Image (spheres, grey):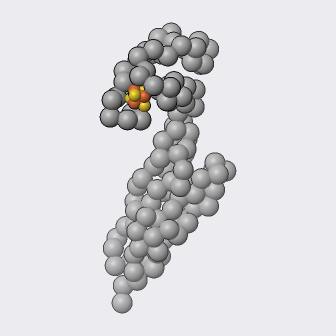
Amino acid sequence: MRRKISCILCPMGCELEVEVQKGKVILVEGNLCERGIKYAKEEVENPTRCISTSIPIQEGGKCETVSVKTSNPIPKDKIFDVMNEIKKVELKAPIKSGDIIIKNVLNLNVDIVATRSVEREI
Ligand code: SF4
């Protein structure tokens, strides 16, 4: 099976033609450098993404939500499961940027981390 993938590692944006057999990349064409081969393999064999979202603050915050992100990319097929875990969280202010909101979410060795601070309402 042949797939087309745009390499997003640099502004050249090479259109990669990737030959895939049994879920494994066996040939990459259209890449102007070696990084495109690695990118194609990761994108086909183990695609990952970072998640950024926000969580409502239930109590005491100057803002109604706090923004969070994954500390590292997670497997693409786990995005919905991780989002469901994030939805379960109930937060109280204050929250500091960098606070770990969920440690080792779903045992993926990735934390959900606050990306901004929210002070407590006085
Ligand atoms: S293959 Fe290399 S040159 Fe092409 S977009 Fe990817 S990193 Fe850039």
Is residue 33 among what the camera can see? Answer: yes
Decide if residue 80 is on the left or right side of residue 22.
left
Q: Residue at x 51, y 53 (%)?
A: 70
- Indicate which quadrant contains ligand 1: top left
The quadrant holding residue 45 is top right
Where is residue 114 drawn, in percent x and y?
Answer: 47, 65
As displayed, is residue 111 above or below residue 56?
above
Q: Residue at x 45, y 14 (%)?
A: 29
Decide if residue 25 is on the left or right side of residue 18.
right
Most foreground residue, 33 or 107: 33
Where is residue 111 drawn, in percent x and y?
Answer: 57, 57
Q: Residue at x 63, y 56 (%)?
A: 104
Where is residue 36 drawn, in percent x and y?
Answer: 47, 26
Task: Give the quadrant of the C terminus.
Answer: bottom left
Where is residue 93 drawn, in percent x and y?
Answer: 45, 78
Give the farthest residue toward the right: 107
Most foreground residue, 79 or 90: 79
Most foreground residue, 43 or 51: 43
Give the farthest residue toward the top: 1
Most foreground residue, 67 or 37: 37
How many numbered markers are drawn?
A: 0
Is residue 5 among what the camera can see? Answer: no
The quadrant holding residue 9 is top left
Q: Residue at x 49, y 30 (%)?
A: 35
Give the farthest residue toward the front: 33
